[in-house]
Image: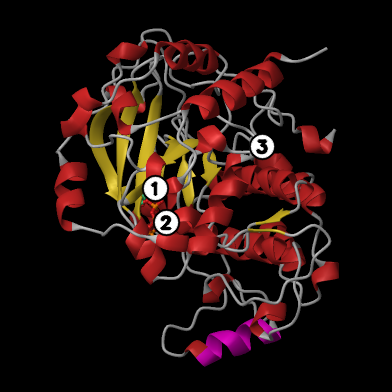
């Protein structure tokens, strides 16, 4: 039997691409700035298809009943308070699942247009082709065709390396998202065209409650736009900076979710390679979301030798320039556990980079006295010099320290 998804994708592939210019230069003729809104008209048939497609688009946590995440049968997961119906906190932090239009997306500051006047240039030739990224013509999972006109703009969420990020709502149907802009010329200047393409291709295919979803992407002459799942509670790094460190309970719950997400990623042969607090976001219920797949790699049966990631989180095999595999993420999970609890990574030496390298290579691991023996055991098992000896992620999920702090009723599919 053909699934709805498959039929939808076929329609999308046939009808949308059929109506769409095929070359990158002509696709850039799409009107994209909010000021030129009236120029953008879609063909009626496209409208119908778009409606049909959005009906089956990814579930939106703000409009529908929360879908039971595949690896999490109890969605009330996470360290933070669940919003109740009587909760009167700011609308932006409260999922209005039944009355979505009341979700306040905040005030738009006109920053996208302002920035677009000053920043970036058109790119030409091969670079233009490489960066003509459009999810409606993606081979694997084509979406409907998107452009800036399809969004109500909300408050700024932050500034990334290559452009700003805004809270937005799609107009029809109404979905809350984060819209991230990337200036093509800056991508070219930094020579990361391939890396960005890879990041987008990888992230678009991932579906896990603790992995930030990429719902779609499109581009105009100067920019690429990423339609990302909105992480309602922002950056985990900010929380860590604010509190200095986390309690064992809170740390254990994050590490539990991390391990589950990494099992999923590795099952798809995706190695993240840049696990660190800066790359983690928090969902509306405080659940952890792995974002930033900039260094990730799809490596089925492959052993990689590229040096990447942040120094403090690098495992010995990478520091020593040896081959590496998905076990680099096991090591990073150990470093992350340590940093959550103690407030800084285990091998850090603020005065000397070479000393950090040396400490990593020696696995010079020391714990302050207030850290429980249980978590010391978990961290030491992950921070093993020999990648093969690192504790398997399925055993992280059954480790007593993780199990003790897991909220009642949460069952992980990867453990079943
Ligand atoms: P950097 O190198 O500074 O991390 P970047 O290019 O990786 O930049 P992001 O970190 O993705 O950019 O985005 C910049 C900021 O925008 C983030 O620090 C975060 O505050 C906010 N942001 C990004 N994505 C989202 C999201 N999906 N939901 C909520 N906020 C987000
Ligand atoms: Mg980032």
Q: Name the residue under label 3.
A: 140
* Segment colored magenta: 354-362
Residue drawn 46% across and 90% down? 352
| x and y, in percent, of residue 101 in the image | 31, 12
In this view of the protein, which residue sits in the foreground, 308 or 259? 308
Q: Name the residue under label 2.
A: 128
Assign the C terminus to one quadrant of the image: top right
Viewer-side label of 3, 1: 1
The residues tagged by marks 2 and 3 sit, at their Cα atoms, a distance apart of 21 Å
The residues tagged by marks 3 and 1 sit, at their Cα atoms, a distance apart of 23 Å
Q: Name the residue under label 1.
A: 25
Proximity of marks 2 and 1: CB atoms separated by less than 8 Å: yes
Above or below, comparing residue 315 to residue 265 in the picture: below
| x and y, in percent, of residue 305 in the image | 70, 77
Above or below, comparing residue 170 to residue 248 in the picture: above
Residue drawn 80% across and 71% down? 387
The residues tagged by marks 2 and 1 sit, at their Cα atoms, a distance apart of 8 Å
Residue drawn 39% across and 50% down? 239
Is residue 278 rendered to the left or right of residue 393? left
Which of the 4 quarters of the picture holds residue 323? Answer: bottom right
């Amino acid at each position: 039997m053909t699934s709805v998804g498959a039929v939808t994708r076929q329609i999308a592939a046939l009808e949308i691409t059929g109506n769409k210019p095929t070359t990158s230069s002509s696709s850039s003729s799409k009107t994209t700035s909010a000021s030129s809104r009236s120029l953008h008209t879609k063909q009626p048939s496209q409208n119908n298809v778009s409606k049909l497609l959005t009906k089956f688009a990814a579930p939106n946590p703000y409009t529908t009943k929360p879908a039971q995440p595949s690896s999490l049968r109890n969605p009330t997961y996470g360290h933070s308070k669940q919003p109740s119906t009587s909760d009167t906190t700011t609308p932006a932090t409260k999922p209005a699942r039944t009355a979505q239009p009341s979700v306040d997306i905040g005030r738009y500051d006109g920053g996208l247009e302002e920035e677009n006047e000053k920043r970036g240039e058109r790119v030409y030739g091969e670079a233009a082709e490489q960066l003509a990224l459009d999810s409606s013509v993606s081979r694997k999972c084509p979406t409907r065709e998107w452009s800036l006109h399809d969004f109500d703009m909300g408050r700024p969420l932050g500034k990334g390396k290559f452009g700003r990020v805004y809270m937005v709502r799609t107009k029809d149907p109404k979905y809350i998202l984060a819209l991230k802009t990337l200036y093509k010329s800056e991508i070219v200047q930094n020579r990361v065209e391939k890396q960005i393409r890879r990041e987008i291709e990888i992230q678009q295919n991932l579906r896990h409650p603790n992995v930030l979803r990429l719902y779609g992407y499109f581009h105009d002459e100067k920019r690429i736009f990423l339609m990302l799942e909105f992480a309602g509670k922002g950056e985990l790094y900010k929380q860590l900076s604010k509190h200095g460190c986390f309690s064992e309970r809170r740390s254990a719950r994050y590490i539990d979710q991390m391990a589950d997400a990494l099992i999923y990623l590795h099952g798809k042969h995706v190695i993240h390679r840049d696990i660190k607090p800066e790359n983690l976001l928090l969902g509306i219920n405080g659940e952890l979301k792995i974002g930033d797949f900039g260094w990730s790699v799809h490596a089925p049966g492959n052993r990689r030798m590229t040096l990447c990631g942040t120094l403090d989180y690098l495992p010995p095999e990478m520091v020593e320039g040896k081959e590496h595999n998905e076990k680099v993420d096991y090591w990073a999970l150990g470093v992350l556990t340590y940093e959550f609890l103690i407030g800084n990574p285990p091998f850090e030496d603020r005065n000397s980079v070479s000393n950090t390298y040396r400490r990593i290579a020696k696995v010079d691991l020391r714990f302050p006295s207030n850290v429980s023996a249980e978590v010391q055991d978990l961290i030491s098992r992950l921070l093993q010099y020999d990648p093969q000896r690192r504790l398997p992620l399925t055993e992280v999920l059954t480790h007593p320290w993780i199990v003790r702090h897991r909220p009642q009723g949460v069952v992980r599919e990867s453990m079943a």
